[in-house]
Image (cartoon, rainbow, N blue to C red):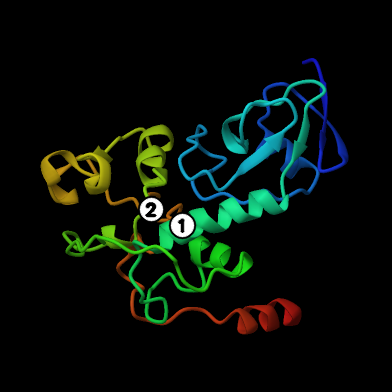
Amino acid sequence: MEQVRLNIDGVEVTTTPDRTILEAAREVGIRIPSLCYDRRMDPFGACRICIVEVEGARGLLPACATRVTDGMVVRTNTEELRRIRRTIIELLLSDQPRDCMTCESAGNCELQDLAYEYGVKESRFSGEQHHYEVLADNPLIERDYDKCILCGRCIRICREVQGVGVYDFVNRGFEAVPGTPYNRPLTETPCGLCGPCVSPCPTGGSVSLPPKGEGRPCCCMNQQEAVGS
């Protein structure tokens, strides 16, 4: 396959034209933050956290869904980009429960990590918030739509990787959630409760029930075990 050459943050990158900006950047160790991206699935471009500046483009572009071109010049971490990403994080947090201290995904939450990285301690935005009942309609998977950021990962992994397609976005606008047909319990759908829809969730929107409440692993203990092994 032919090769293309582009510049990302001053680094000359040679890759193939089937790559996206996000993939090309990661090939050379340049991190572009994202929330809806998962390398196992097709680009979705929903969260807009991965926006970048491309010389000559009419606006900011999502790195996860923009193919590289020869001669492209990309900037991924300007102050303007950081300002916009902070605003996006604030908007997402404005509709999140304030229960990080007791959330099952605390310490393993990508939204929490980005808030820390970008120094977002609280949201400037206020307004109506979601208040859904937690769905625990089966013995293995719990869904909390109050923590969902509509990244679509659970929908796409079920459809594109597992080949089942239990979930899809239901309702519209503010009421949209990744639900099942007619809001049926998972046990009344083709779902096999296999669990891959839980692993890609970047927040606590979907968690596994069996280990819930048993405590989170300590990273210090993990490091000590790794040193001792």
State the separation of the CA atoms marked 2 and 1: 8 Å
The residue singled out by tag 1 in the image is 202
Tell me the number on the disc at residue 16: none
Location of residue 179 by image quarter: top left
Between 52 and 154, which is closer to the camera in this rendering?
A: 52
- The three-letter amino acid code for the residue at tag 2 is Ile
* Residue occupied by mark 2: 149
Residue 167 vertical position relative to residue 137 in the rendered view, above or below: above
Mark 2 touching mark 1, by CB under 8 A? yes
116 above or below 185? below
Quadrant containing the C terminus in the rendered view: bottom right
Q: Nearer the viewer, residue 106 or 186?
A: 106
Amino acid type at circle 1 is: Pro
Can residue 94 be seen from the camera position used here?
yes
Is residue 162 rendered to the left or right of residue 86? left
Relative height, residue 160 to residue 209 (above, below): above
Q: Is residue 124 left or right of residue 28?
A: left
Q: Residue at x 71, y 50 (%)?
A: 31
Mark 1, secondary structure of its residue? loop
Classed neighbour count for the residue bearing mark 1: other residues with Cα under 10 Å, few (<14), some (14–19), many (≥20): many
Residue 54 rendering spot, x and y as whole percentages: 71, 32
Front position in the image: 140 or 178: 178
Mark 2: which secondary structure? loop
Of the image marks 2 and 1, the number of the one nearer the N terminus: 2
Q: How far across and down, in percent of the image, does residue 74 sit?
A: 76, 36
Looking at the picture, how far across and down is residue 184, in whole percent? 12, 46
Q: Residue at x 57, y 40 (%)?
A: 39
